[in-house]
Image (cartoon, grey):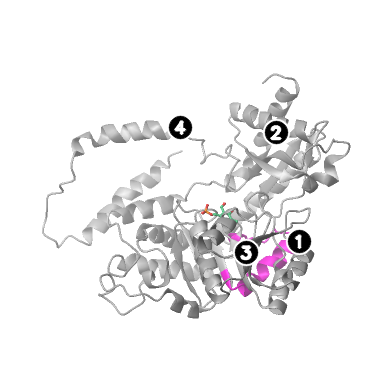
Amino acid sequence: MLDRESLGVFSEVAKKLDGGFASLPAFENQAPAMARLAEVLGAAAERLQDNYPYFHPLYAGQMLKPPHPVARLAYALAMWINPNNHALDGGRATSAMEKEAVAEIAGMYGWKNFLGHLCGGGTMANLEALWVAGQGHPGKKILASEQAHYTHGRISGVLQLPFELVACDVRGRMDASALAKRVARGDVGTVVATMGTTATGSMDPLPDILALGEKHGFRVHADAAYGGYFVLAENLGEEAKRAFARVGEADSIVIDPHKHGLQPYGCGCVLFRDPEVGRLYKHDSPYTYFSSAELHLGEISLECSRPGAAAAALWATQRLLPLKKGGEFARGLESGRKAALALFEKVRADERFVTAFAPELDIIVFAPRAASVSEASDLSRKVFEASARHDLHLAVAELPVRFWEADLGAMKRDRETMTCLRSVLMKPEHLDWVERIWDLLSLAVNEVASGRH
Ligand SMILES: Cc1ncc(COP(=O)(O)O)c(C=O)c1O
């Protein structure tokens, strides 16, 4: 798990950072109880062992991947300063780093003149985007698909904006004709287009949504929290490619560096195409903005204090792995996608499983074949547990039965949803581990089928 080499680099760069403050008079660090530091950290290390091994390729469950070593170390390095990116007064260097790193992210969508910043994560970023959307269309509806992240409904509640779900097609994408019918009835202020749904990685039909937005005058918000970086991948299907090519036409975009961007948790990003929305944030903070007339990030974000360390980590990661098509970072995303396609093909070709649809990004869903949907649902949970006993960690999801219709055959449709297995193959290492993952999955399914579990 530990990349010891990078720990060695850390003590070198920490000395370098220290050197920048060498002219200050020495002082005695009075952090209390240092004598028990090692003991307590040892206890913490023990407690932390009670986790799934998220960093390992055999963890192929939820949307979790380890930060790049450069992100971990840049974050840790910044912690010695503990800058606060609310204001230049609290985090001068890291505010500049944040502006640069965010501009690089916006650049992936062709945006140069925009407004944006980092925040705690996708939920906070979507809250901010929908807050701005609501100011533009007060009291009007926010629409998102049935498969959109659950927080959109909750966020709309917090913002006291009416919220409605739009049906999905059988591939888990927002149904463009259902949306067309709904917006024709009026009263819609904003449509959330999910660029990669959380459960299945399905891509909402952005070109259709943008066309309807043009006709009916609603705002389009792209929730690309999970899928956003795939704009750099060159091995996507045609529809996904077409949708990503248009993300820059949305009014706002959310993308999570702490999902596919190799960052530790606590790093989301919200971007607005029109920098003029900055006026909505206008507030006075006479006690924080005093050292510079330049933009303080707190003047354009809902949150006040934010970790400058997150900006340092992101900046360093993007310096090492620029956000470019064909670059090493993009190749990592492409590997995960290849792994998902390879595992999907194995599952699809095997009679023991039912599949819904081919992955659009790097998430696959499948279930054990059985006499009925309820039996398959029960078996999914058993396979999940049996796999874990062999150190293969998958996830479980609940999806509408109609997503599976094409492959259900004679299976009795005795439930409206099916509990299935879900695997997010988001680590570049997954590609080399597909065979091993498949072998362990086969083993687990056979054990469950033979009652040896
Ligand atoms: C599409 C989408 N939007 C929003 C979120 C929420 O992001 P966070 O968990 O960073 O708050 C997620 C999380 O998985 C997501 O997949």
Few, some or many residues within 10 Å of mark 1 (<14, 14–19, 20+): many
- Residue topped by disc 4: 50
Rendered image: mark on residue 231: 3
* Vertical relation: 163 (above or below) 415: below
Q: Earlier in the sequence, mark 3 or mark 4?
A: 4
Separation (CA) of disc 3 from disc 1: 22 Å
Name the spot of residue 41 as percent of width and height, x first: 31, 36
Few, some or many residues within 10 Å of mark 2 (<14, 14–19, 20+): many
Check mark 3 vs ligand 1: CB closer than 8 Å? yes or no: no
Separation (CA) of disc 2 from disc 4: 24 Å
Name the spot of residue 321 as percent of width and height, x first: 50, 60
**Residue range highlighted in magenta:** 228-252
Rendered image: mark on residue 380: 2
Asked if labels 4 and 3 touch by Cβ distance under 8 angstroms, the answer is no
Camera-nearest label, 4 or 1: 1
* Vertical relation: 239 (above or below) 421: below
Camera-nearest label, 2 or 4: 2
Give, as a three-letter code, the residue at label 3: Val
Q: Earlier in the sequence, mark 2 or mark 1?
A: 1
Quadrant in which residue 429 is drawn: top right
Q: Is residue 337 within the magenta segment?
A: no
- For the point 42% across and 68% down, which residue is it? 301
- As drawn, which residue projects farthest toward the right? 410
- Residue topped by disc 1: 175
Give, as a three-letter code, the residue at label 4: Asp
Give, as a three-letter code, the residue at label 1: Asp
